[in-house]
Image (tube, helix red, strand yellow):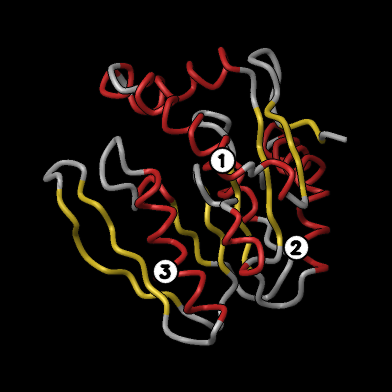
Amino acid sequence: MPDTDSREAVHDDMVLLAPLLQAVAAAGSNPVVLIDGPSGAGKSTLADALRRHWPGPHTPQLVRMDDIYPGWDGLDAAVCHLHRYVLQPRHRGLPAAWQRYDWTASQAAEWNLLDAARPLIVEGCGTLAAAHEPLSHVRVWLAADDALRKQRALDRDGEAFRTHWDQWQQEWATYLKQEGPEPRATVRLRAGSSGRRGLDCLP
């Protein structure tokens, strides 16, 4: 039997996810959900929670942009990859797949096929590019304070990310200027401050 803390954590997840779960439920049986926001905002955690509590009968597939970026200067390339090989083919009813980038070997690795009959979640910087709007059903923007998200990103990726933080931030700033992704979101959330758990819904 789950302990009290576990039951409370599940309850908190459900409350915090409520706006997103409602949007997913209204999107039909096989939607595409895109989760965007700055590095360290908590996109991976949100995607994992959504997958655990998915309201439909079929567990969604989860694609992480971190597995696609071809290196630290690869945001634009990953956006194009997502559009060309995943979202556009799926929208047209054609086979879709994504290619993993091996960060250790610094080269492209294996292709991963996607099941057109199962829902799809894609999380990561760059998912809410303008070209992706008509190819998706639920679009999430997850924001967070700069200090909080930088600490989260460094805690997650270690010192390897520290030396690339400014480089990635410049790429992110260029993406924001060119694509203007936040207004494209159908659900907007903000990560909680370092002193509390969870998310706040933005107006």
Q: CA distance from mark 2 to mark 1?
A: 16 Å
Residue in front for this viewpoint, 111 or 196: 111
Q: Amino acid at mark 1?
A: Lys
| For residue 30, side relative to residue 81 (left or right) | right
Q: Earlier in the sequence, mark 2 or mark 1?
A: 2
In this view, the residue farthest toward the front is 178
Q: Describe residue 25's horizontal placement relative to residue 172 as left or right.
A: right
Instruction: Report the residue at 21% width, 43% height from top.
Output: 103
Please give the name of the residue rendered at 56% of the width and 67% of the height, measured from the top-left corner: 120
Q: Pick the quarter of the image with the C terminus.
A: top right
| Position of residue 104 measured from the top left corner of the image (x, y, whole percent) | 15, 41
x, y percent for residue 148: 57, 16
Where 131 falls versus 166 (above or below)? below
Badge 2 marks a residue whose secondary structure is: helix
Reading the image, the residue beneath label 3 is 84
Whichever of callouts 2 and 3 sits on the residue coming sooner in the sequence is 2
From this view, report whether residue 28 is shown above or below residue 177: below
Of badges 3 and 1, the one in the foreground is: 3
Q: In what element is the residue under mark 3? A: helix
Q: Is residue 140 left or right of residue 44?
A: right
**Residue 24 numbered mark, or none:** 2
Q: Position of residue 18 (x, y in %)?
A: 82, 49
Compared to 50, does 195 lie above or below? above
Q: Give the SS element for disc 1.
A: helix
Residue at label 1?
A: 43
Q: Amino acid at mark 2?
A: Val
Q: Amino acid at mark 3?
A: Arg
Q: Label 1 near label 2: C-beta < 8 Å?
A: no
Residue 28 x, y percent position in the rendering: 76, 75
